[in-house]
Image (cartoon, rainbow, N blue to C red):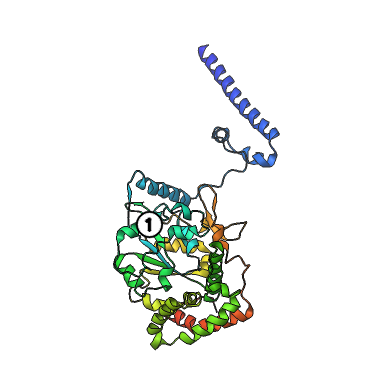
């Protein structure tokens, strides 16, 4: 009799559970649109599976896409990386990542794409008077330490221009002036002070870069209400009319036997007339003549600025390999911002977009365009220097 009663009670309990589940499911089926709960999908699931989803407070909709093994591994490695720095004291550490240029070729975007990596530290505290400056993004991560005229290096001064970091973290700084600005001994100085640090260099179409630099210098004058020699030139053509003949005479075509001497002359011309740099920065092969006695492909990664602009993801993966960093930033993390069409980082944990500041969209927004005549003149100026660069690097860029 007792056994019979237990069986009946168990049967009633099971029937109640089934009825409750079916009622609950039917209720949601009526309240929510069919396409929101995908009833056809749910009815094929077992009650246990349904209850599991129900009590986990998952949204009614298509079942979430399965998490790949790669995503699981990345999440685990990311959390472990963050944990290893928790509660660690921060102090001054010299940079392991240094971007040396090139101006107006996307160096800020490159470093902003790298910033989310849990092992990388960049950016320093700026004084209050600079925080409203539209160019603050550059100042935050540009140390401008090795482009000073003195060779008496005070590492405390350098540390003051770098972020504090934990032991084992990768401090990063970028100063595009290092590559092509005075003094002549910048490459030697970096190698002396940072003998094991690897460098990043972005090269882009020198023709488009020159226009971007011209626009940048004009914007600097406008923002800071300053006057200068550039104000004499109301458009890019008027600037080229004065400076292009001057630099053609001073530098001329690429001649291998005179290249080292010419690289020195370019720096001298920079000191003589600052606005020369709008044209001379793009003479990449001449500038590399200064760097190659100290660096090669093992410690200097040269990045195609055109590819960085059109598809940054693979480049970010290559950089992590170059520095032996755990590959936690993947190519699919970089997507186009629907509002600006510029690439940005999409946080793989939250889905939020890390957009570039508006100040970095001034000279590449399509408002400033080269005329056909300007393009022809600049291509002629850079032609033999580009050819020398391609030969020097044993690679080509689609600039011609």
Give x and y (percent) for residue 193: 30, 65
Find residue 157 and report its image quarter.
Answer: bottom left
Q: Position of residue 93 (x, y in %)?
A: 32, 56
* Residue 9 visible: yes
Residue 94 can be seen in this image: no
Q: Which residue lies furthest to the top in this view?
A: 1
Say if 14 sits above or below 122 in the image.
above
Seen in the picture, residue 25 relative to 274 is either above or below; the reply is above
Q: How crowded is mark 1: few (under 14 residues within 10 Å), some or many (20 or more)?
A: many
Q: Nearer the viewer, residue 82 or 241?
A: 241
Quarter of the picture containing the C terminus is bottom right
Which residue corresponds to mark 1?
162
Residue 358 as seen in the image, left or right of residue 201: right
Q: 37 or 151: which is nearer to us?
A: 151
Q: Residue at x 55, y 84 (%)?
A: 380
Q: What element carries label 1?
A: loop
Looking at the picture, does residue 122 appear above or below residue 364? above
Residue 379 in percent (x, y) is at 55, 81
The mark tally for this picture is 1
Q: Where does the image place residue 319, in percent across and percent down from the top left?
A: 42, 63
Residue at x 57%, y 75% (from the top left corner): 232
For residue 38, side relative to residue 285 (left or right): right
Residue closer to the observer: 304 or 378: 378
Question: Is residue 23 found left or right of 361 in the rendered image?
Answer: right
Which residue shows up at 45% across the image and 82% down it?
A: 388
Instruction: Say left or right for 146 vs 7.
Output: left
């Amino acid at each position: 009799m007792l056994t019979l009663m237990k069986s009946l009670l168990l049967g009633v309990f099971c029937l109640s559970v089934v009825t409750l589940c079916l009622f609950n499911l039917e209720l949601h089926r009526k309240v929510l649109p069919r396409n929101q709960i995908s009833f056809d999908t749910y009815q094929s699931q077992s009650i246990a599976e349904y209850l599991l989803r129900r009590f986990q407070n998952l949204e009614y909709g298509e079942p979430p896409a399965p998490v790949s093994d790669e995503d699981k591994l990345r999440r685990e490695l990311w959390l472990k990386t963050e944990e290893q720095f928790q509660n660690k004291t921060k102090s001054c550490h010299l940079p392991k990542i240094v971007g040396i240029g090139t101006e107006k070729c996307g160096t800020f975007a490159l470093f902003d794409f790298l910033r989310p990596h849990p092992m990388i530290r960049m950016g320093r505290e700026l004084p209050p008077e600079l925080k409203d400056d539209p160019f603050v993004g550059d100042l935050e991560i540009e140390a401008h330490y090795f482009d000073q005229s003195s060779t008496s290096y005070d590492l405390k001064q350098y540390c003051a221009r770098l972020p504090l970091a934990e032991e084992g973290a990768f401090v990063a700084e970028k100063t595009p002036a290092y590559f092509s600005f005075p003094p002549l001994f910048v490459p030697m100085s970096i190698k002396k002070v940072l003998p094991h640090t690897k460098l990043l260099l972005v090269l882009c179409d020198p023709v488009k870069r020159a226009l971007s630099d011209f626009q940048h210098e004009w914007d600097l004058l406008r923002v800071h209400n300053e006057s200068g020699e550039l104000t004499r030139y109301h458009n890019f053509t008027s600037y080229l009319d004065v400076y292009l003949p001057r630099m053609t005479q001073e530098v001329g075509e690429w001649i291998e036997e005179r290249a080292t001497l010419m690289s020195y002359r370019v720096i001298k011309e920079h000191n003589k007339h600052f606005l020369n740099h709008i044209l001379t920065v793009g003479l990449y092969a001449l500038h590399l003549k200064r760097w190659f006695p100290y660096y090669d492909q093992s410690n200097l990664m040269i990045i195609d600025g055109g590819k960085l602009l059109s598809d940054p993801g693979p480049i970010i993966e290559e950089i992590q390999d170059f520095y032996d960093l755990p590959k936690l930033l993947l190519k699919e993390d970089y997507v186009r911002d629907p509002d600006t069409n510029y690439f940005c980082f999409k946080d793989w944990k939250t889905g939020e977009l890390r957009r570039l500041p508006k100040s970095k969209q001034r000279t590449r927004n399509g408002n400033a365009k080269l005329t056909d005549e300007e393009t022809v003149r600049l291509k002629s100026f850079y032609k033999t220097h580009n050819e020398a660069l391609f030969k020097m690097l044993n690679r080509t860029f689609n600039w011609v």
